[in-house]
Image: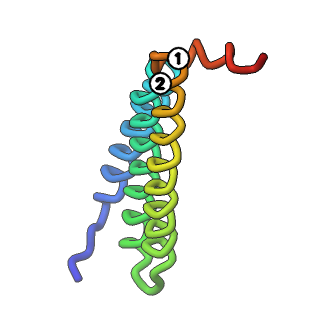
Amino acid sequence: MIPIGNVIEHYVLLASVIFVLGAVGFLVRRNALVQLMSVELMLNAVNLALVAFNRQHSSDMNGQMVSFFVIAVAAAEAAVGLAIVLSFYRLKSSVFSDEADSLRH
């Protein structure tokens, strides 16, 4: 195995940049599909950080195991989120999240 030395800081920096981009995309955009993609970006950033820390502590596989479960949760979130967006589009003919509050009556 190749030791990564001080390179883990680069992976953590990249993961934090990707996470911030996902968080900003989720908070700024009104389109529900873009918001779902932003959540996927945040989950992938967490996966990158988990795998980077797991490479530093290679005696156990906890980081990769948790990353595998995060990938499974992301797949389920994408399927359920897309189903919700499709049913919302059929009802309102729009995917803007600002119009979702009109469903409460």
In the rendered structure, which amino acid carries the disc numbered 2? Tyr
- Which residue lies most toward the front here? 90
Residue 89's disc number: 2
Instruction: Give x and y (percent) for residue 61.
Output: 45, 81
Identify the residue at horizontal 43%, vertical 65% (top origin). 53
The amino acid beneath tag 1 is: Lys
Task: Give above or below for 42 relative to 59.
Answer: above
Q: Residue at x 45, y 66 (%)?
A: 67
Q: Is residue 30 visible?
A: no
**Where's the N terminus, which quadrant?**
bottom left
Secondary structure, mark 2, is helix
Residues tagged 2 and 1 counted as in contact (Cβ below 8 A): yes
Position in image of residue 55 (x %, y %): 36, 72
Residue located 49% across and 27% down the image: 26
- The residue tagged 1 is 92
Question: Is residue 47 something one can see in this rendering?
Answer: yes
Q: How many marks?
A: 2
Q: Quadrant of residue 29?
A: top left
6 in relation to 91, above or below? below
